[in-house]
Amino acid sequence: GGMKIVFDICIETKEGRIYAMYLKRDIPEIAAAAPTGNGQKFSITKAHGLLGHKGEEDARKTAKALGWTITTGGLGTCEGCSQGKAKQKNMPKKSDAKTDKDRVYLDISTLKKAKDKQGKKIDDSVLPCTKPNWRIIVTERENLKSSEFYKKKSDMPEDTCVQFKRMQQAGRGVKYLRMDNAGENNTLSDRMNSADWKLGIQVEYTARDTPQQNHMAELGFAAIAPMGRACLAAANVPRKYRWRLFPRVMSLCTKVDGLVVIDIDGVTKTRYEHRIGHNPKWAAYLRTFGEAATVKTRNLATSKVEDRGTIMMFVDYAADHSADTYVFWHEKTGKEVTSRDAIWLRRMYFEPTTTTGEIAICDDLEVSVPTHEDAALDDAALARYEAREGVTYDADDADETSNEPIEPEQEAEQQAPAQALQAEQQEGPTSRPSRVIRAPERLIETIEAVSMSEVEKNMYQNMLSAASVAQFEHVSEIACVGAGIIGGDVQSTEELRTMKYDEAMANMDPAKVQEAIKEEHNKMKSKKVFKRIKKRDLPDGAIVISTTWAIKKKPSGLIRARMVARGFEQIEGVHYKGDDISAPVTSWFTIRIVMILTLMQGGVLKMQDTVGAFLLGKFEDGIELYIEIPQGFEDYYGQDEVLLLCSTLYGTKQGAMAYYKKMKATNKEIGLKKSIVEPCLFYRWLNERLVLNTSWVDDNLYGGNDEEVDETMNQFRERLECDDMSEVEEYIGCKVDHNRRDGIIKITQPVLIKKLRDEFDIEESGRKITTPAKAGSVLERPKEGDTVLSRKKQSTYRSIQGILQYMTGCSRLELGNAVRETARQNSGATEEASEQLQRTAQYVIATENRGLMLKPTRKWDGKKGFKFKIRGKSDSTYAVCADDRKSGLGWCVYLEDAVISAKSATGKIVMLSVTETEIAAAVCCVQDMMFAYRIILSIELEVDLPMVLEVDNKGAVDWFNNWSVGGRTRHMDTKAMWIRELKEKGIVKIIWTPGDENESDILTKNVDGPLFEKHGSNWITDEEVKRDNG
């Protein structure tokens, strides 16, 4: 009767106050540690924690090897990992590297507290680390690691000799030791082979500043440190204690890492079993770092009224004791206690302190390891490591991009962007060992630069995954969806930014936002996208995916809302198949071909948008996906309900591919055939006239004669709901002005120009700027010691660069060389580069009416039998890059004298002569010409042969037309033979053209105003093109 319950927590809401209390149930485990051996059943989440936050795949393999049964369900998002491993990147896990079982790698690193720009320690309130010197030893064959921490580096040599002696006595002696020649390592070398120890170990010293030679140890730090940070975060350890506990958590993670299952010579075992024949005794009694336990502290001096035990935190396994003996940490005394007399309390020692949505990243726990900027790890070193691990040794910030310009042959080899900030990066297929296939750099920059919804970002990143880029060579040349025309009540491009629910309700008209959400709900309900399920009826182990909103004001002023599933929470094998999530999109190369063919026959260009495209796909193979009730749907569903998806949804991994399959099947049903060259190009011959269709996700562009186009679009609309947008005025972020009477199309991007003004305060220069870069200038990359932009300025630099790269690929081809030069400094730009970038942006603003012009010189009746003309021009500038002596390449390709491709690139290798650079540029041009040639043939049309390539270097022309090979160009045989073979077959003809008539010259160097205007006029125009339907 004397007890009372106090609701002492007050939560303010819009509706009023909620009074709450905190309840905690204590259920002590009255027994000693239970074994975690054969027959034990755990969830994958529990196993993940027990095994030191190893990845799901490794956790499952290790659990199987230890005889555990893992219950159904996936790991989901581990908060500890999302914090502790925020900068970790995955790498492929296959390698043919061979190792020596008698070699080990050793290195020592010092833990350093983070400092600010003035060199002061950021936080002096944390307890210091008593043993900051971390020594790691890694065996080459098994990648089995051993960690020890020392107060002074000089303590390391003697202790290491003891460890090597034990290994020798156990029959696992070390023959070779790889390490650098630091002072303490020299002492170790002397002691190992002294009369006291006589270990007979041969030391292999690494060269100065070459961490790649000691890669196993260097990467050992990179593998263990993220695991330790994840354990600290998951255990809710306060920041003040993290430094003090860092050595212990690293020791634990190193031990647990030895339980990872690997394959050596066809035998699959844990690292320990490969090395010593069995797992350690403590492996049968695993616990989670940070667990609370009451540890017996009674001794003979303890009085009868004092407690017999103290609550402590589990921090490590006692390796040299009985199996169920642990190391505990006493918070008050700061001391460690080794004991097997513990009562486990089934909770973590520290309670969570962050509120929902907050993330306390352990960014002040840093390991002093050389970055790849000092000396990059080579492919062979990484290959050996990646065979055992799933992490990349990468000390760069996650948001930095490559500073190399895009080259046609590189585009399919570059790493795809992260799918969402909250998700850990996933490994992709490789083009060669240790190289992850990457999406085009310009797309990465454009995603940062152009306002896009989470839906669009996820969609593009799915479709640009390595599988898609690897399968379709030219699909990689893409652009990002953006607004083409500003209208309605939009005053600034900032208003077009995508927002989540709370932000939209605060910054937009709430009534209009709610109306957009209601419209989205009604659309999904009508399409039967989901059905409600009571939480109590969920299958055991079912994972419920969270949702968010992508709410955006369109350029017209209309507010659009999209409910998005957080696809990064999906689990491969549970919610999707990894080989079925990539879908292709069309390229500007193909779009221009469609437009030119339509212009030639005086036809119409129309666009049809599929309504709810991502809601049309179906889950295959019995996959079930549940989502939480999103904000704004509270009026329709109860708090005790979730939604079972009956079809794919925006943000789901398989959404893009599911729609592509649906769209492809629908096109086939109405008689549209798919090009065997371009997966997003479809065609049909109707009434003996050609109808073309190319798709950018759900935006279908049709070209052809009015009657046939309308019939095709109507047939498509009968099967899939579509919004007819009549004749094209805007397509994938570009304004399209089509004059059918004169047979001309002009493409501009006014929204991005307005974005440069609104968001980056870039205005026209006081002086007249006639070129994007100063004539004769060459931009060099920063050298060692040069001053580069601050982090904030570099971020702005990349955003502007992304906009300009996007415009270069779509409407402003003449920017090619200037943008190529500034792209080489995306990860660290000089003030000179920043000034050139500003100049290029000012040039774009000063010439805002300028745009790409498509005007074929011949007419066509739209029927078979016509032979189309394809030609190209190429040029180069020898050794133009002063920092690495690489050459600049440029080329352009025309279909019926209308440009379909104009590119600028840096040579992939250092070339030895002017002729060689001209050959390289010519090969790139012929590759694009052949792609256009194959596209034309794939839609049952003909090409007038031979296609003519114009080169302004007589030596290169003679070389292509001559079968002899000189000493200085012998290594170019393969490329030359390819073009020579095409020449012999009558497909390509190479002729000489004067340099002042070769417009590709402006794609290789910065030229003066008159020459720039002369050549640029082949692709761009300032003239207004008025819409005229003829």
Image (cartoon, rainbow, N blue to C red):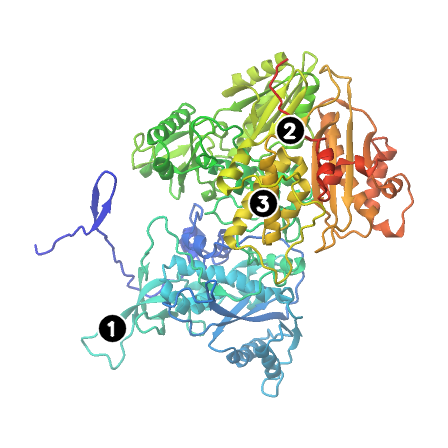
Mark yes or no: residue 316 visible: no
Q: Which residue is mark 1?
A: 308
Secondary structure state at the residue bearing disc 2: loop
Q: Residue at x 50, y 52 (%)?
A: 792
Count of all numbered marks drawn on residues in the image: 3
- Outermost residue on the front side: it is 767
Q: CA distance from mark 1 to mark 3?
A: 72 Å
The disc label shown at residue 838, or none = 3
Mark yes or no: residue 358 visible: yes
- Outermost residue on the left side: it is 1
Secondary structure state at the residue bearing disc 1: loop
Quick one: quadrant of the N terminus? Answer: bottom left
State the residue in front, 889 or 84.
Answer: 889
Q: Report x, y in % for residue 816.
A: 67, 40
Tell me which amino acid carries mark 3.
Gln
Q: CA distance from mark 3 to mark 2?
A: 22 Å
Can you say whether 504 is above or below 401 in the image? above
Tell me which amino acid carries mark 2.
Asp
Q: Report x, y in % for residue 915.
A: 83, 46
Q: Report x, y in % for residue 385.
A: 60, 60
